[in-house]
Image (cartoon, rainbow, N blue to C red):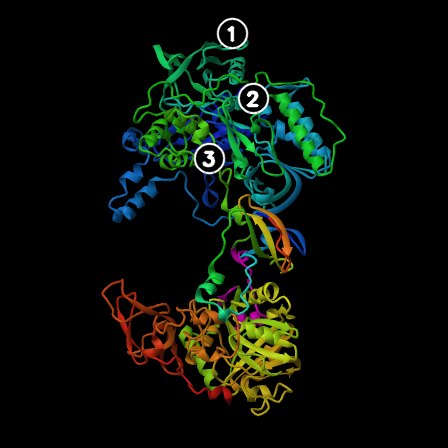
């Protein structure tokens, strides 16, 4: 059970949040120009990293804002949290 | 005779407070401060229960939560609890407990025949015997389940209350023994918020049971002084009778506090148990260690217990469980118990596995007339319901074999001590890694996680003075990391235990030197009846991984999770494979640390508090008028309104006819409503919905379908433009929260530059939907809005007053009839409803529920997302291609409509079904096939998604998703029912009534 630092509210218990999978997968600008394979890649393929992983969380029972989290999937430690639109921190 | 084993004085029981209790129906007397185990031992009751597999008589092995044997059924009726450890139950007036796993009685148990059949019940017996043929497993299982399990679960509802508490602290100290007290003291003196948790009724730990001296104070007085100081600090909280059960990431721990379990009554002001969820900045584990049994033939009989436990019964409870005592040991420390027993008048013999006994020990034993057999081993025991004799033999240390003649010694108590295992369960749960320490022949904590320390015996440190000082130091260090410091240092000069647990040779296990053969009874895991022979067998059969051995033999899988057995099992494996224990590894410890009630985990989240109930502003009216309710998500919605003796079908027929022919009213307040504001709403809706929104005028409404990126229908509803930059979106009742999150997700993560603000307004508006040919005439007298056909056409909205209340009226329809949806602020909802009912009398206004709503919409072929769709259905599959824009460059789901799978023409498509017999209402969910066979499997071509009797059409109607259905109009398909009957039905259009849609344009 994490303590997660919401970039807007500060440290809060994990029960206030929910996780929404891998971050930094931008929706393609022009989906119509993509091949089925490329579109399938966007929809389904995720990196499933061992080690540093970037993921999206929301503070559902708080400010309801979305933000990004950098987590080590081996130690299960949250290393950085940052706002949407901010550059992804180096690992 | 009562309390015949109680010594005259000493211990911490109050001899002036007698307590009456019953065990197996017989009355006994104990004292205030007794556990059930100590009180039974005081009354010379050693036989407590029967073992799991062989039904062997079992007694009391330990004095704490690690007890594998003395499990009892506690309490009666709805409050009865199985598998309660007699060693932990504090007795109270009127307590009733009984033995488990025996019939007809613990003294004469039919199941003990298994003991003599043990040669046919080896490890893996069930796996080997009941596997074939697979078809008979269900038959076998019935009997196996009956034979398995120890106690009996209550069948009545639990009458007790359980509470939960969240707690945040600077430093959590787990364990209130010598080391835990020291760490808590240092942290408490530094001003940290400290939570000290101890399993027992009072902290103090093992120091309470031995004669230790700390700076000339005896250990009990010294502990009491420390406790007094701790209790004087406001920043220190001490929880007794509380066990930490789980240790999770980021120092999140759960603990179970037994609040009133030890009392004869349960107060309605106090919960029975309280479940703590603790978040600590720092955690100090000070849980101590468990004494290890020795593995020898017949080591499980009643009257055989751990040396430390016997010492606890003697010194803490004033009970001498036996007068003719044999101590079997491989270390110095247990000699303290022997000497204590001799001092209290018992005849004591020591059988020591080692050759060289330190002279200090033998001198002290001589003084109290204790006879020592060095280099000897117990090789067998006798006595059915209680041990009465042991056989010992000399051990040849050079080749590790037995020599010389057998010697028999009579006794009434056998104590064993195989060394100590640090209690590493919680540490291991926290992902700490263990290492094997050969000096102890056990595992100790190795790599600590962040903000965690382990102190005292828990860390493998057994020198009292060192432990006290180190533990205090650890408390200070953690305090200083939190920016706090103590103004007092620890001033302890000397601390002596009468006998230290030294680095004497500690053998990990003893197989009694009597050869382990098939069926021999050297018990390793007492609770699961796993013997050394079982461990040998598992290795022979190839289950050599520690995880495999565990599962094959079930060692360590009892409710005690192998607290007394795991290390012995690993040591045996190491012996068999001739490999160091390090290379054998160990199994993983998991929560809970000891058995816990489900009630405490549920807390108050039971019955009507299990899930929030949402009620509309009209709810009480519905209740008063006899509505039957249906749960839709968390909402309570009227299902139908039966009158007099009507059944559901009668009521629904009446309600539907009222809507089609007169005037019906529906409480539609539960519909999800989202207020959208901002200059970019139209642009946003264009991306969210499949159809076009840029040209929607102020005051107009439009139906929209939302798809996910896979192109599958996800929600639907009507959205209206209230003003230039303000829209009112409606969603399905169950999908409201999901849609809101969906909108926010894209606004916050993809289209950050769009200016759109979403606010949930579901509960701000009460929605009264009036429907039927009379609705315009009825409403016109109650509103100042011109609602004439010309001024207020279909799919428009207007604002004005209704019954004097500010309202929004939407001319939209879910029944196909002329309808108005009137939204008023919820605080006026019931008022307007009552006005409607009053003024509607002359139109015979008829309230209708969700069932009629479903029938009416199905007659019109309107879908319900989630009923007629299931997450694998595209708009095209719904025959709703008309709502998918061909002009828009992009919207959510668009790209997926051209995937190879979604463009298939033989996908399941929504069609109507009419049964050929004109009377059968098909069960929803029925399979549709082309060819019916006598029994499954059959080739399924689809399923029935909605099915009702239609009062309007006067025959049943159904919607179904059928492969290639849109190209099969007029085909006859078959629907096999559960009863075996097969119904024929014809595929039709999905609109059954008013195909032109003329009625809602009236």
Callout 1: SS:
helix
| Nearest to viewer (mark 3 / mark 2) | 3
In 3D space, how far apart are the residues under numbered discs 1 and 2 (Cα atoms)?
Answer: 22 Å
> Which of the chains bears the disc numbered 2?
B
Find residue B435 and report its horizontal and vertical position in percent. Answer: 51, 30
- B894 or B164, nearer to the observer: B894
Please give the residue where the numbered disc 2 appears in the rendered image: B315
Work out whether mark 3 precedes mark 2 in sequence or the reverse, and give the earlier one: 2
Q: Residues within 10 Å of mark 1 (few under 14, many from 20)?
A: few
Callout 2: SS:
helix
- B54 or B995, nearer to the observer: B995
Find residue B906 and report its horizontal and vertical position in percent. Answer: 34, 72
Q: Are marks 3 and 1 on the same chain?
A: yes
Snapshot quadrant of residue B285: top right
In the rendered image, residue B718 lying in the magenta stretch gets the answer: no
The span picked out in magenta is B607-633
Q: Residue furthest right?
A: B487
Relative to residue B689, is residue B489 drawn left or right? right
**Can the viewer see residue B389 in this picture?**
no
Find residue B71 and report its horizontal and vertical position in percent. Answer: 44, 34
């Amino acid at each position: 059970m994490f303590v997660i630092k919401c970039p807007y509210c500060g440290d809060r218990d994990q029960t206030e949040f929910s996780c929404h999978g891998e971050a930094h997968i931008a929706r393609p600008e022009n989906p119509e120009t993509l091949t089925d394979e490329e579109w399938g890649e966007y929809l389904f393929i995720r990196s499933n990293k061992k080690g540093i992983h970037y993921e999206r969380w929301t503070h559902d029972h708080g400010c309801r804002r979305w933000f990004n989290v950098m987590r080590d999937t081996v130690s299960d430690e949250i290393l950085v949290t940052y706002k949407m639109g901010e550059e992804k921190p180096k690992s | 005779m009562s309390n015949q084993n109680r010594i005259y004085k000493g211990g911490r029981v109050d001899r002036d407070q007698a307590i009456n209790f019953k065990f197996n129906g017989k009355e006994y007397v104990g004292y205030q401060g007794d556990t059930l185990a100590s009180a039974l031992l005081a009354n010379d009751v050693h036989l407590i229960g029967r073992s799991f597999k062989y039904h062997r008589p079992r007694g009391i092995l330990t004095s704490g939560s690690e007890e594998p044997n003395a499990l009892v059924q506690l309490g009666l009726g709805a409050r009865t609890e199985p598998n309660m450890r007699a060693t932990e139950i504090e007795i109270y007036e009127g307590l009733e407990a009984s033995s488990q796993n025996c019939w007809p009685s613990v003294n004469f148990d039919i199941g003990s025949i298994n003991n003599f059949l043990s040669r046919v019940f080896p490890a893996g017996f069930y796996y080997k015997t009941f596997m074939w043929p697979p078809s008979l497993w269900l038959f076998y299982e019935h009997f196996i389940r009956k034979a398995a399990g120890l106690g009996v679960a209550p069948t009545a509802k639990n009458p007790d209350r359980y509470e939960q508490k969240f707690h945040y602290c600077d430093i959590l100290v787990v364990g209130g023994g010598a080391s835990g007290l020291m760490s808590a003291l240092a942290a408490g003196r530094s001003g940290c918020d400290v939570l000290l948790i101890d399993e027992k009724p009072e902290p103090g730990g093992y120091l309470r049971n031995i004669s230790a001296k700390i700076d000339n104070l005896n250990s009990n007085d010294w502990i009491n002084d420390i406790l007094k100081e701790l209790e004087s600090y406001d920043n220190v909280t001490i929880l007794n009778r509380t066990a930490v059960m789980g240790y999770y990431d980021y120092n999140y721990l759960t603990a179970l506090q037994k609040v009133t379990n030890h009392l004869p009554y349960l107060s309605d002001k106090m919960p029975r148990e309280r479940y703590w969820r603790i978040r600590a900045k720092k955690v100090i584990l000070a849980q101590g260690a468990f004494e290890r049994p020795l593995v020898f033939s017949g080591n499980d009989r009643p009257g055989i217990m751990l040396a430390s436990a016997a010492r606890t019964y003697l010194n803490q409870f004033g009970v001498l469980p036996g007068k003719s005592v044999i101590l079997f040991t491989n270390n110095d420390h247990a000699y303290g118990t022997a000497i204590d027993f001799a001092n209290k008048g018992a005849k004591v013999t020591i059988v020591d596995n080692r050759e060289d006994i330190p002279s200090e020990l033998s001198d002290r034993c001589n003084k109290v007339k204790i006879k020592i057999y060095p280099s000897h081993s117990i090789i067998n025991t006798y006595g059915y319901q209680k041990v009465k004799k042991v056989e010992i033999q000399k051990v040849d240390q050079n080749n590790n074999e037995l020599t010389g003649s057998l010697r028999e010694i009579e006794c009434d108590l056998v104590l064993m001590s195989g060394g100590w295992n640090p209690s590493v369960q919680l540490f291991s749960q926290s992902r700490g890694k263990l290492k094997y320490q050969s000096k102890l022949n056990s595992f100790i904590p190795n790599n600590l996680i962040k903000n965690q320390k382990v102190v005292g015996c828990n860390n493998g440190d057994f020198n009292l003075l060192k432990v006290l000082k180190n533990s205090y130091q650890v408390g200070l260090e953690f305090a200083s990391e939190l920016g706090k410091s103590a103004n007092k240092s620890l001033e302890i000069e000397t601390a002596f235990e009468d006998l230290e647990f030294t680095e004497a040779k500690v053998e990990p296990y003893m197989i009694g030197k009597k050869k382990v053969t098939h069926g021999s009874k050297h018990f390793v895991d007492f609770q699961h009846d796993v013997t050394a022979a079982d461990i040998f067998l598992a290795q022979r059969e190839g289950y050599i991984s520690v995880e495999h051995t565990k599962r094959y033999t079930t060692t360590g899988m009892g409710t005690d999770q192998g607290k007394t057995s795991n290390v012995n099992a690993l040591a045996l494996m190491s012996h068999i494979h001739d490999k160091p224990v390090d290379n054998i590894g160990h199994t993983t410890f998991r929560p809970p640390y000891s058995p816990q009630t489900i009630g405490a985990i549920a807390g108050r989240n039971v019955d009507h508090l299990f899930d929030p109930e949402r009620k509309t502003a009209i709810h009480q009216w519905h209740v008063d008028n006899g509505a039957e309710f249906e749960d839709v998500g968390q909402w309570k919605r009227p299902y139908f309104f039966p009158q007099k003796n009507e059944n559901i079908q009668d009521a629904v027929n009446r309600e539907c006819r009222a809507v089609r022919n007169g005037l019906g009213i529906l409480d539609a307040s539960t519909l999800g409503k989202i207020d959208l504001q901002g200059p970019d709403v139209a642009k946003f809706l264009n991306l969210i919905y499949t159809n076009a929104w840029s040209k929607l005028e102020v005051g107009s409404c439009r139906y929209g379908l939302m798809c996910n990126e896979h192109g599958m229908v996800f929600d639907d509803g009507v959205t209206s433009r209230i003003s230039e930059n303000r829209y009112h979106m409606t969603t399905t009742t169950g999908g409201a929260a999901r849609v809101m999150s969906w909108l926010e997700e894209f606004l916050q993560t993809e289209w950050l530059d769009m200016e759109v603000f979403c606010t949930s307004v579901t509960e701000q508006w009460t929605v009264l939907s009036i429907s039927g040919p009379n609705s315009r005439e009825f409403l016109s007298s109650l509103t100042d809005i011109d609602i004439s056909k010309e001024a207020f056409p279909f799919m428009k909205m207007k604002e004005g007053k209704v019954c004097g209340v500010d309202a929004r009226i939407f001319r939209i329809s879910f029944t196909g009839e002329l309808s108005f949806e009137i939204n008023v602020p919820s605080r006026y909802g019931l008022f307007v409803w009552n006005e409607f009912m009053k003024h509607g009398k002359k139109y015979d206004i008829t309230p209708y529920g969700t069932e009629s709503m479903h029938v009416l919409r199905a007659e019109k072929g309107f879908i319900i997302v989630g009923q007629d769709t299931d997450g694998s259905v595209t708009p095209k599959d719904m025959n709703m291609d008309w709502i998918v824009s061909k002009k828009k460059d992009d919207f959510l789901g668009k790209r997926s409509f051209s995937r190879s799978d979604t463009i298939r023409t033989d996908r399941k498509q929504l069609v109507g079904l009419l049964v050929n017999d004109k009377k059968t209402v098909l069960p929803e969910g029925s399979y549709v096939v082309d060819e019916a066979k006598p029994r499954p499997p059959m080739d399924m071509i689809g399923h029935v998604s909605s099915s009702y009797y239609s009062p309007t059409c006067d025959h049943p109607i159904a919607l179904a998703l059928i492969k290639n259905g849109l190209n099969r109009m007029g085909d006859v398909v078959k629907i096999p029912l559960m009863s075996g009957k097969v119904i024929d039905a014809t595929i039709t259009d999905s609109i059954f009534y008013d195909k032109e849609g003329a009625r809602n344009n009236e």
